[in-house]
Image: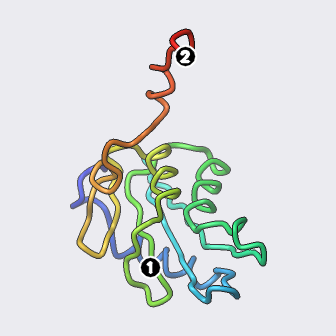
């Protein structure tokens, strides 16, 4: 399932658009939806949820990762994120980190420039392996 040819990008985009229509974005008026394909074939999705205290708003990817965990976990294989027009939208930095954690370097992301891997959209990423290589006695 890791090959771009076997991923139904139109279906992922359609699911992301469905999710975007559920967004709560009264402050920015910038709804976002996302959908992901899990390694077991499930589809998970999320939408952004804003808050009057701007800093605690939730990106769409946060909701999708929460749904991923709630429905059995697994690894993300492919992700499509869209704006209010249904156009591909690059996840923000925090969300790229979430996608790295739950999809890894080979997870594919639909971007305005075409499908890219997480290794391409988050080069030199920080992950759990980096925590394993920390030697507290050297500090």
Question: What residue does disc 2 label?
Answer: 139
Is residue 125 shown above or below 94? above
Of helix, strand and loop, which one carries label 2? loop
Q: Earlier in the sequence, mark 1 or mark 2?
A: 1
Identify the residue at horizontal 49%, vertical 81% (top origin).
Answer: 17
Q: Nearer the viewer, residue 11 or 57?
A: 57
Where is residue 94 shown, x and y percent of the image? 52, 56
Viewer-proximal residue, 135 or 1?
135
Q: Position of residue 4 (x, y in %)?
A: 24, 59
Where residue 41 appears, as percent x and y from the top left, is 44, 53
Residue found 57% across the figure and 76% down from its top: 19
Residue 35 placement, left or right of 110: right
Residue on which disc 1 sits:
14
User: Which SS class for mark 1?
Assistant: helix
Q: Is residue 104 left or right of residue 43?
A: left
Picture mark count: 2
Residue located farthest toward the front when viewing the structure as drawn? 139
Is the C-beta separation of discs 1 and 2 under 8 Å? no
Alpha carbon distance from label 1 to label 2: 49 Å
4 relative position to 77: left or right: left
Q: Residue at x 62, y 85 (%)?
A: 28
Q: Nearer the viewer, mark 1 or mark 2?
A: 2
């Amino acid at each position: 399932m890791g090959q771009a040819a076997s991923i139904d990008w139109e279906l992922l985009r359609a699911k992301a658009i469905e999710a975007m229509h559920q967004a709560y974005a009264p402050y920015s008026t910038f709804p976002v939806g996302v959908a992901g394909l899990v390694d077991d074939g499930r589809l998970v999705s999320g939408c952004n949820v804003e808050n009057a205290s701007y800093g605690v708003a939730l990106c769409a990817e946060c909701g999708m990762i929460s749904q991923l965990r709630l429905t059995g976990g697994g690894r993300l294989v492919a992700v499509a994120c869209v704006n209010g027009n249904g156009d591909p939208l690059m996840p923000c930095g925090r969300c790229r980190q979430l996608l790295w954690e739950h999809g890894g370097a080979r997870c594919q992301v639909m971007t305005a420039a075409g499908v890219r891997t997480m290794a391409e959209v988050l080069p030199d990423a920080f992950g759990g392996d980096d925590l394993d290589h920390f030697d507290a006695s050297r500090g």
